[in-house]
Amino acid sequence: MHRIVVTHFHNRIIVAYLLDDKAVELQLFTDNPYPVGTIFSGMVSKNLPSISASFVDIAPGLTGFLQNCDHKCGELIPVQLVKEGTKEKAPKVSDALSVTGKFAVVYAKSGAIRASSKLDPDIKKTLLASVKEALGKQNRAVILRTNAASADIEDIVSEIRELSAKLEHIEKHAHTRTKSVLYSPGSEWAHYLAGMYTDHMDEIITDDPALFEEIRRIFPDEVCGRDQIRLTLYEDHAYPLVNLCSLEKHLKEAMNKRVWLDSGAFLVIEKTEALISIDVNSGRSGGKADKEETFFAVNLEAAQEIARQIRLRNLSGIIMIDFINMGKGSHQSELLSALKQALKGDPVKTQVHGMTSLGLVEMTRMKGRKTLYEQSGSVSDDETLSGDERRI
């Protein structure tokens, strides 16, 4: 069963994607007045010619870092928040504006209509042809999202026109108000939920009436009826939804450095400044006569779990995987193919680059929201995490 759970969790909102009661995605959201995607009318406050960058004042007490720009100090420019700031780095902004809907992303620049690389090539070809024909002349660049595959063409076209109108409004007021919000995507959790790939989804459940009404606006009755998604307001106050779906347990497991596999082997996942390292250990799975076949089987099992853990923990950047050494070249090829196949379900762009001369598998995953560990950083130790559970 594919289920999305939306509820309150330690003064936050958690969005959990569960597949047969096993966590696939966990995202924590705070009440952020400026979520990623917010567009500001900012003022350039400082230029850094040596690196072709600038600092832009976007809100009272908030300055963004803008790369690859050519603007004068004091100039008013519209910029969009693309990455949250950290203690060490200012939030990252871009002057390439876009607005995102459930089915499409529309850009302020001119360009062609393209589709997500995650879509099946045949579906992509048919979808693009249908949208282009229905939309007619379109000056703005558009990318169709994976959710568009199961949507009516009329709904996709209607959303693209609505997003284009929002961009026109933004452009009209971009240079009239200093350090003000021109566009907000709304509640960050709701924006995230709207963008989730809901094909094959069976149920979206929450125990909060206000959250339920917001979800109904994102997924109206006609959409749920067509996609056969059940919206449920859970009302058993004697047994909270957090407990019913074991959300605290899922979160703690997703913070552990060590992940046990059914075979008795285990993964060790560690984050460094430069990359994520994942080590596959045979653990209690060894001792069998044919070690080559045993290690191959363990590595295949590990590949499936690694793909889940990367998505679950929202790991990104460079990821190095140290599988158990195998002698057969055919086993190495099959393992890489199995890992690539397992990663296909990840909505975030990932790429397996191959095996290094040291036998390490090198892959990358596009950066987006903070890692799950970073999202949970302000939850105190005694509330959720302790010991090794806080390492990642």
Image: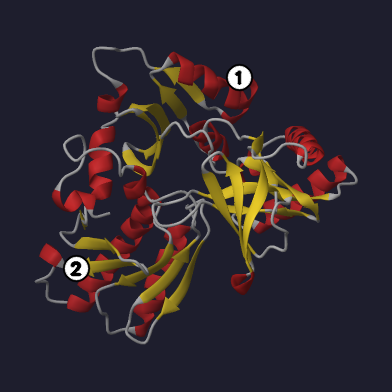
The residue closer to the viewer here, 382 or 331, is 382
Disc 1 packing (10 Å; few <14; some 14–19; many ≥20): some
Q: Report the quarter where the N terminus lies.
A: top left
Whether residue 82 is visible: yes
The residue closer to the viewer here, 19 or 359, is 359
Q: Amino acid at mark 2?
A: Asn
Whether residue 153 is visible: no
Which residue of the protein is positioned furthest toward the right in this rendering? 137
Q: Is residue 190 above or below residue 95?
A: above
The residue closer to the viewer here, 93 or 15, is 93
Q: Amino acid at mark 1?
A: Asp
Disc 2 packing (10 Å; few <14; some 14–19; many ≥20): many
Q: Residue at x 13, y 65 (%)?
A: 283
Q: Report the quarter where the C terminus lies.
A: bottom left
Q: Residue at x 34, y 66 (%)?
A: 273
Give the structural element (helix, strand or loop) at label 2: strand
In the image, residue 348 lies at what x, y percent? Answer: 51, 54
In the image, residue 34 lies at what x, y percent? Answer: 54, 37
Residue 281's tag is: 2
Q: Is residue 295 above or below residue 162?
A: below
Sooner in the amino-acid sequence: mark 1 or mark 2: 1
The residue closer to the viewer here, 273 or 282, is 273
Q: Is residue 12 left or right of residue 173?
A: left
In the image, residue 374 lies at what x, y percent? Answer: 35, 48
Q: Is residue 188 above or below residue 80?
A: above
Residue 203's tag is: none
Q: Residue at x 55, y 27 (%)?
A: 228
Q: Kindly report the distance in space between the C-alpha atoms of the residues bearing marks 1 and 2.
A: 48 Å
The residue that disc 1 covers is 221
Give the structural element (helix, strand or loop) at label 1: helix
In the image, residue 382 lies at what x, y percent? Answer: 16, 36
